[in-house]
Amino acid sequence: MSNAQHPSTTVPLPALDFRSAPERLTLKREEVHIWRVGLDQHPQTVARLSAVLADDERNRADKLYFEKDRRRFTVARGVLRIILGRYLNTKPEQLGFHYTKFGKPMLANAGVDALRFNVSHSEELAVYAVACGREVGIDIEYLRPDIEAEQIAQQFFSSTEAAMLRSLPGEVRNRAFFNCWTRKEAYIKARGDGLSFPLDHFDVTLAPGEQAKLLSTKNDPQEAGRWRLGELSIAPNYVATVAVEGSDWHLVCWRWAEGISSIGERRSPT
């Protein structure tokens, strides 16, 4: 971990410029596209989004206990299909997915240079990362003030990270915890290993104001150099991180604001 002095207050991140997406989307190899979506949509929009889901996705939504969670899951998955459909010029309901043995979704029949994507949602927001020919992971968490940060860190984080968290002033410890959590989640999601890759087998930075980095991993000194992490300023009271394979990339940020009339429509080839 860095030996730099820790700030006593949270250092604000520069706000990302989330623009309205153009009708025709292109994704360059050196770009990683970040999408921000509000999950509390009008009931008519939710119904139309549900119509583009596959049966297994609707079944997953139906199994959620709370109506709010069913609605938000439907929006998150429906918008994912619409976003990917726009890149591929394909109707969203025609997209096929398969899942790795650890549950990471991928486009069916995806080649080496195919789109890679990842999704995360927390409370009322979802974020999506889309890249071409490189693995990507993203995680967003709402800053819950009641979290037992030190106890969870002691159980799941590396000993170095847990000690670093304890050393921080109390007023920034909560954000530092979520910095660490989202950086770890984004990295293991990018790898596609799920819970098979223990959270205490690698170290990330966590202090507010400290650059998001994968510092080291056990048993592979070269692994940290394969990945670059980016801290994302999505909205107040949220923390988010993207993890991307390689270092030769930059972010392009979009917001989803399509009207329900455009859901499921196919666009002309670019």
Image: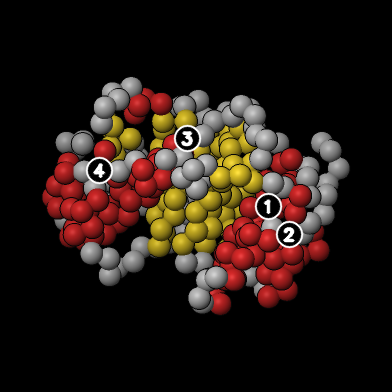
Q: Is residue 158 left or right of residue 108?
A: left
The amino acid on which the numbered mark 4 sits, given as a three-letter code, is Asp
Q: Position of residue 161 (x, y in %)?
A: 21, 44
Q: Residue at x 51, y 67 (%)?
A: 124
Q: Which residue is mark 3?
A: 244
Q: Amino acid at mark 1?
A: Arg
- Provide the residue designation for mark 2: 52
- How far apart are the alpha carbons under marks 1 and 3? 21 Å
Comparing marks 2 and 3, which lies closer to the viewer?
2
Is label 4 or label 3 in front? 4
CB within 8 Å, label 1 to label 2: yes
Q: Nearer the viewer, mark 1 or mark 3?
A: 1
Amino acid carrying label 3: it is Val
Question: Can residue 243 be seen from the camera position used here?
Answer: no
Q: Position of residue 101 (x, y in %)?
A: 49, 43
In the rendering, at what x and y percent does residue 210 appear?
Answer: 29, 42
Residue receiving disc 1: 81
Element marked by disc 1: helix
Q: Alpha carbon of mark 1 to alpha carbon of mark 4: how far?
A: 34 Å
Earlier in the chain: of badge 2 and badge 3, it is: 2
User: Label 2 amino acid?
Assistant: Val
Q: Is residue 192 left or right of residue 159?
A: right
Q: Secondary structure at mark 3?
A: strand
Q: Distance between the Cα atoms at labels 4 and 2?
A: 39 Å
Q: Is residue 89 above or below residue 246?
A: below
Local crowd at mark 4 within 10 Å, few (<14), some, or many (≥20)?
A: some
Residue at mark 4: 200
The image shows residue 57 at horizontal and vertical percentages of 62, 60
Asked whether 78 or 193 is in front, the reply is 193
Disc number placed over residue 58 in the picture, else none: none
